[in-house]
Image: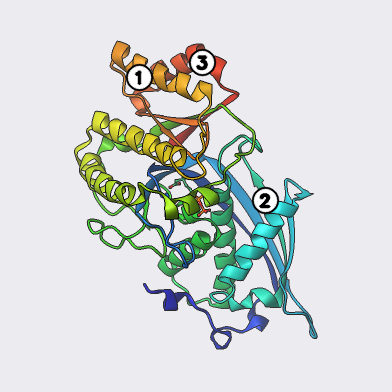
């Protein structure tokens, strides 16, 4: 689909069909295996390489959107009230207004309503897990649910594509959270249907070893990041190694496709660790440079490597844009790895959250 297919013009719907309503949507967070890092300049949220992630079943955001039509004469600015766990949050509210502004030409009805948005995460607030992906995805799904009342002929497949398209405009990685399982975003020559505008469910064969993988999130640092992802993406525009990184990410995606089919868990693990460390190497060598890892991040990485040598267990890590670690391992290692985390790693972590890649 092209960008023009997502516009909804005033003559395509009647506000009188949907004067007020309430919708609720839940969306999972996701962890990227091949990372999105860098956006095209002078575009809105167009990635410079393709990425693939697992959605995390037990880590989600729930959002309720209430709306009622404005009565004339009314102002054409956005009317939004926002509550996070029942409390107003100015910073999030501002982000929502930016989001509404970005999507308004695709959802021309937004200025005709008053909105109240209430949201919560099922994971602890400020736990260091990026919640913008699950939040923006849940909000985009709510908006599409509302759009469906205005345009009842809208198909399920279009509903999800446009939800992903809108979520991308809120936060790039959010477009992958619209779907469960393995999800791809960004054009890649070897992945049919992949594109920069919205994410798609991974379309190829996946070996059974990758079904129901466990992702245990080790929260090492709960303080807000000093360099946000959005700033980090920008730094890639002047990064001396950027071109090589994009080439490498595309090559890694090709490797990932064959690993996912063949079920080679060691190769899978090596690839995701390489991707994670490359992401961090990019931020360490940007200008200005920065270090997200904390001493305990490095400590745990070494403990994972040591455990693999000693026990030959299949446990690998990936990192998000911060100090926290995601440990990925197959379901059949759960007992052993779970005990090891409790006995050996807890000391270095503030919290742990176990989830399933579904
Ligand atoms: C390291 O999606 O948070 O998690 O598009 O500016 O909102 P914006 O950035 P964001 O970046 C995520 C970066 C990452 C890798 C990934 O999820 O692919």
Protein image colouring? rainbow
Asked whether disc 3 touches disc 2, contact meaning CB atoms under 8 Å apart, the reply is no
**What is the quadrant of the N terminus in the image?**
bottom left
Residue designated by label 1: 305
Does the beta carbon of the residue at mark 2 sit less than 8 Å from ligand 1?
A: no
Is 223 drawn above or below residue 151 in the view shown? Answer: above
Label annotation for residue 113: none
Q: Residue at x 60, y 78 (%)?
A: 108
On screen, residue 204 versus residue 95, left or right, reads left
Mark 2, secondary structure of its residue: strand
Q: Position of residue 20 (x, y in %)?
A: 71, 72
- Where residue 33 sits, quadrant-wise, is top left
Q: Position of residue 49 (x, y in %)?
A: 35, 54
Closest to the camera, between mark 2 and mark 1, is 1
Q: Position of residue 295 (x, y in %)?
A: 52, 22
Q: Earlier in the sequence, mark 2 or mark 1?
A: 2
Mark-to-mark CA distance, 3 and 2: 31 Å
Residue designated by label 2: 119
Out of 97 and 117, give the one closest to the viewer: 97
- Where residue 121 sits, quadrant-wise, is top right
Residue 357, visible in the rendered structure: no
Residue designated by label 3: 342
On screen, residue 265 versus residue 214, left or right, reads left
């Amino acid at each position: 689909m092209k960008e023009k297919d997502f516009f909804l013009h005033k003559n395509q719907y009647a506000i009188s069909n949907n004067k007020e309503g309430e919708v609720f949507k839940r969306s999972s967070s996701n962890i990227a295996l091949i990372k999105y890092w860098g956006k095209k300049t002078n575009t809105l949220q167009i990635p410079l390489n393709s990425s693939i992630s697992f959605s995390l079943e037990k880590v989600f955001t729930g959002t309720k959107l209430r709306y009622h039509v404005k009565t004339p004469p009314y102002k054409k600015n956005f009317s939004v009230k926002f509550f996070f766990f029942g409390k107003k949050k100015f910073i999030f509210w501002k982000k929502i207004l930016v989001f509404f502004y970005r999507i308004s030409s695709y959802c021309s009805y937004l200025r005709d309503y008053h909105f109240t948005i209430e949201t919560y995460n099922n994971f602890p607030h400020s736990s260091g897990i990026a919640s913008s992906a699950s939040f923006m995805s849940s909000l985009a799904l709510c908006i599409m649910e509302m759009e469906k009342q205005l345009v009842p002929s809208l198909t399920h497949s279009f509903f999800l594509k446009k939800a992903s398209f809108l979520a991308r405009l809120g936060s790039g990685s959010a477009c992958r959270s619209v779907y469960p399982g393995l999800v791809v975003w960004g054009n890649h020559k070897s992945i049919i249907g992949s594109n920069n505008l919205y994410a798609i469910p991974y379309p190829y064969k996946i070996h059974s070893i990758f079904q129901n993988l466990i992702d245990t999130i080790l929260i090492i640092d709960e303080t807000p990041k000093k360099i946000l992802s959005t700033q980090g993406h920008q730094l890639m525009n002047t990064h001396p190694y950027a071109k090589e990184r994009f080439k490498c990410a595309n090559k890694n995606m090709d490797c990932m496709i064959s690993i996912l089919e063949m079920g080679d868990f060691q190769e899978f693990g090596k690839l995701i660790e390489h991707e994670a460390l490359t992401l961090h190497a990019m931020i360490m060598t940007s200008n200005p440079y920065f270090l997200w890892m904390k001493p305990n991040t490095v400590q745990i990485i070494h403990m994972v490597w040591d455990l693999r040598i000693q026990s030959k267990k299949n446990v690998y890590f990936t990192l998000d844009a911060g100090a926290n670690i995601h440990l990925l391992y197959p379901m059949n290692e759960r007992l052993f790895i779970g005990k090891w985390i409790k006995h050996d790693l807890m000391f270095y972590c503030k919290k742990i959250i176990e989830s399933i890649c579904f």
